[in-house]
Image: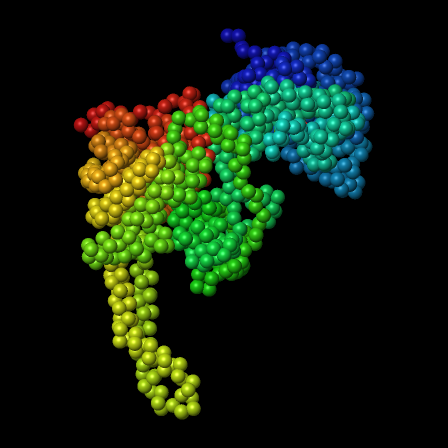
Amino acid sequence: MKSPKFVYLFEEADGANKKLLGGKGAGLAEMTHMGLPVPPGFIVTTEACLHYYEGKKKLPKGIMEEVQTNLKTVEEKAGKKFGSPQNPLFFSVRSGAAISMPGMMDTILNLGLNDKTLEGLIQITLDGRFAHDAYRRFIQLFGKIALGVEEEEFDQILNKSKARIGAKEDTDLDADHLRDICGQYLGLIKKRTGTPFPQEPMIQLKLAIEAVFRSWMGKRAVAYRKEFNVTPEMANGTAVNVCTMVFGNMGFDSATGVAFTRDPGTGENVLYGEYLVNAQGEDVVAGIRTPKPIQEMKKEMPKTYRELERVRKTLEEHFHEVQDFEFTVEKGILYILQTRNGKMNAQAIVRTSKEMVGEKLVDKEKAVLRLKPHELEQLLHKRIDPNFKGRPIAVGLPASPGAASGKAVFDADEAERLGKLGHKVILVREETKPEDIHGFFASQGILTSRGGKTSHAAVVARGMGKPCVSGCEELRIDPKVKEAIIKNVHIKEGDFITIDGSRGEVYLGEVPTVDPEISKDLLTLLSWADEIRTLGVRANADTPEMAMKARQMGAEGIGLCRTERMFNAVDRLPIVREMILAGTKEKRAEAIAKLLPMQKNDFKEIFRTMKGLPVTVRLLDPPLHEFLPSAEELASELRNLKELESAFASMENISGAMRYLDPSSRDSLKLLENVAADITEIKEKRLDKKLIRKEQDTLRKVKEMMEVNPMLGHRGVRLGITYPEIYQMQIQAILEAAAELMKEGVDIQPEIMVPQVCTAQELKWVYQLVKKIQKGVEKQYGVKIQFKFGTMIEVVRACMRAGRLAEVADFFSFGTNDLTQATFSFSREDAENKFLPLYNQRKILQDNPFEVLDVKGVGRLMMITIEWGRRTKSDLKIGICGEHGGHPESVEFSHSIGLSYVSCSVPRLPIARLAAAHAKLKEKDKKPPEKYDPDTSFSIFF
Ligand code: ADP
Ligand code: MG
Ligand code: MG
């Protein structure tokens, strides 16, 4: 069998074949084809590397002959000779796999140097110091990489010499010093390897190629591939690039530098970079001299600058991507040494995407794909100013992204009070509860010492798009004294703090932040994403204000409107409590009658805001006791009341005993006497007793309603069926709101959604209730109401019964938060606070399933549900409204299993829109997920 070709000249290699040539080699080949000035050279392929390993670490036969042949051509082109003392050719030997693996191997520069060619280098560069330093570095690097001599031993020699001469820096060494050090280096190599340093250039080259191949299986490289999951399909073996050395240190018409074809920080369409005159690449990296901005080259080296401008244009027109390239100028002649796709920040990607479409460099699809959804996230939140250098005083969990500063406040009421006065506040709590919600609205951000990333604080903050750091355990909070202690620092109420919810950091004082930027360019890019995607994107929004924001951010409807958020409003809560605590049907009806017009108004406003688009209203979901004070709170109030009662009793006695006092002091006691009279009046009216009785009643009711597992208890549709008045009122409010708006001629698309359904019977029960109320409302208003009726899918049984549920439902909406809890049998608070971190760490679970949808388990259930649901009703609309709806990977999965839409929190809308477009574009080169076939699966059981 004829062995394959292992060595390619830059001009004959196929620059598209990164797998064979490695990234750097492919770039060099491609640039050579394009006519860019690349110093001549050749590539030893990755295939040769694989053969090297197959052949028990021996170079494949004939390879050095191939190298020799190619070298000849290079010598001719360069007009120099490898190993010639008069006119020597030197090479750089550089590794390069298909995927860039930084730090895998150092580049060997000036290969071909030996005692004789050193003289030639001095001739070329006219710089004895430089030539000796190059030799010194070459011996050291070659000794370490190719011959395996410890780097430290070289350093010891160098340091001893420096000490002897009294040199502080390497730069204090002159040519003679360096010549001496070279001599010692050569001695060291002979001592350690038993043979003299290879003076023969061809042998140096062979050893260098072998060393590059060895580095592929080196510790650093193997660890890197493992860490970043680099599979053999992505990169298999490294190539070796052998490239003629060019010198940027041959006087003031020579230079070296790196440049981007556009500014990677802003995306601006200008040449961007740095350079050094009379220097080699290493000098830039080593930081010995400070490079100049490339714009200065316009004046200093105008011809080269114009050439670089041309290179910039050529590179972009060829690669259709911003390039990051290395160059060297030798005596006025420009050489390009490397090019690759430029890494940019999100802002720069957005701007270049928009502009490159305008310049017809890329199409809209490519432009959209350039911005990764998780990179977009950077742009959507306030960040700590990247120039700020301070350190955090504590670190918790990054629960909701963004940075915020404000005065520390330790309870929700105070937060609301200060917020209304225009102060910026950060709500600091051990943990938060639904009754703290008004404090959230008033705060810039939330900091808690307990709770995971799905604690109440985290979930609510994310929903509102406010920064949150949760589970900051270093923080000790004392709400009574109103202070928090971190290490030895006391934070008192009113002290400024800053939190960074993207990193989980807490800072003292007001740290400077930079604003999020939804630039015009980003809006354009998102509008292109909308043209591409087929998956719908809706928002979870509970108020007209949020609905308005959702519309502005491109939501195509509301996928989840939580009615309990309306019940929690300050003016509603007392009425809601009245309703819950009502002793009789009549009393309850009274309270409900007060709630009806309020809810109707809520719905009207939201429907109106979202006119022309669907709005899914979920009927009441949480257990009722969430609207009541806790048993502990009540018990403590009751104790206070009883103390008051006994205080009253003793006050009365005081007034009786007052006549024994000295008449002169009686006057001053007049006040007390008045108080006593008031108390008697209170007692006569038995006000205190009434209060106590009321409180006792509430406490009894609260205790009655207490549940062991409230989240698996009396909630959702279960509550709706047992207290039908509540759902009745809500349905009435929705339909009346709809009827009134229809009469006004507003185009509305209401959808009624039932939570926690596990059997078709439940759904049918609610459905007949809806039908009955619909009849009444239609008669009253004289209109036919168009609306949809559907169910949440968040109970495992509901998935299994999807076929039956679809008989009644027009749509399904996966509540993946609860469905994930139910599938794993994890209560998410407990999971996140106790065992999940360890599970993730040990890789027992890859991700936190409450953040990243568990495709294998929960996803499977979803696929079954879709399959069975659509068998019953082929046009069944199916969405997802759990927090996962805004997570890029989950959005992609949702697209691939045929969901109609995702619904996410308002701030995540841009991410969902972009991710949905990516899903559509990537679908072409992806296998669809395994179809779940219920029939074949059933045959296993029966
Ligand atoms: P890396 O993968 O770390 O970028 P390179 O192989 O690009 O490594 O080499 C690092 C530096 O060495 C380059 O930036 C350049 O300054 C210098 N270099 C490499 N090859 C040559 C060459 N043929 N002539 C001059 N300098 C070179
Ligand atoms: Mg390198
Ligand atoms: Mg490089």
Front residue of 860/315: it is: 315
Would you place residue 909 above or below residue 309 in this image? below
Front residue of 826/508: it is: 508
Does 43 sit left or right of 549 as displayed?
right
Residue at image location 25% in from the left, 57% down from the top: 581
Residue 940 position, x and y percent, is 22, 27
Does 756 sit left or right of 832 as displayed?
left
> What is the quadrant of residue 784 in the picture?
top left
Would you place residue 74 above or below residue 941 in this image? above
Residue 127 shows in the view: yes
Front residue of 41/521: it is: 521
Residue at image location 34% in from the left, 35% down from the top: 745
Would you place residue 497 above or below residue 875 in this image? below
Residue at image location 62% in from the left, 30% down from the top: 268
Picture colour scheme: rainbow
Which quadrant would the C terminus be assigned to in this image? top left
